[in-house]
């Protein structure tokens, strides 16, 4: 399992966090995602390595901002 952590800005409530999780888990190859609203950290568990740009694009197309991917 491959894991990446995205730092996401613009999440202000649990609804936002749930939306980001749903967006990330809809990306092909993502097995699960955990979103921490207070820190903006989104941990993504993937079956295969997904390019950072693909994850970033999915989140940013929903109106949030990705500031870092590790």
Image (spheres, rainbow, N blue to C red):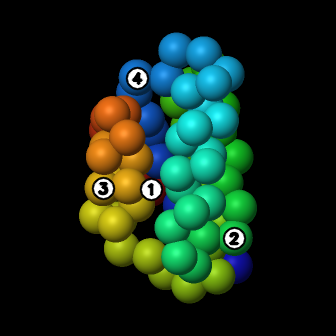
| Residue 34 vertical placement versus 27 (above, below) | above
N-term-proximal mark, 2 vs 1 = 2
Mark 1 and mark 4 lie on one chain; the one further toward the N terminus is: 4
- Residue 2 seen anywhere in this rendered image of the structure: no
Asked if the residues shown at circle 1 and circle 3 are in contact, with their CB atoms under 8 angstroms apart, the answer is no
Mark drawn on residue 60: none
Disc 1 versus disc 4: nearer the observer: 4
Which residue in the structure is indicated by mark 2? 31
Quadrant of the rendered structure where residue 51 is? bottom left
Q: Tell me, yes or no, whether the two marked residues, 3 and 2, touch with CB atoms within 8 Å.
A: no
- What is the quadrant of the N terminus in the image? bottom right
The 10 Å Cα crowd at callout 1, few under 14, some 14 to 19, many 20 or more, is few
Q: Mark 4 points at which residue?
A: 10
Which percent across, then down, holds residue 58?
Answer: 38, 55
Which of the two residues, 22 or 30, is positioned nearer the viewer here?
22
Across and down, in percent, residue 19 comes to 57, 38
Please name which of the two marks, 1 or 3, marks the residue nearer to the observer.
3
Label pair 4/2, CB-CB below 8 angstroms: no
Residue bearing mark 3: 57
Q: Mark 1 points at which residue?
A: 70
Between marks 2 and 1, how big is the CA–CA gap?
17 Å
Q: Is 67 located above or below residue 31 in the figure?
A: above
């Amino acid at each position: 399992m491959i894991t990446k952590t995205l730092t996401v800005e613009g999440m202000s409530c649990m609804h936002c966090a749930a939306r980001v999780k749903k967006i990330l888990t809809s990306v092909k190859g993502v097995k699960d995602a955990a979103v921490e609203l207070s820190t903006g950290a989104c941990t993504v568990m993937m079956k295969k390595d997904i390019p950072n740009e693909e994850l970033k694009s999915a989140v940013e197309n929903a109106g949030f901002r990705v500031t870092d991917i590790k």
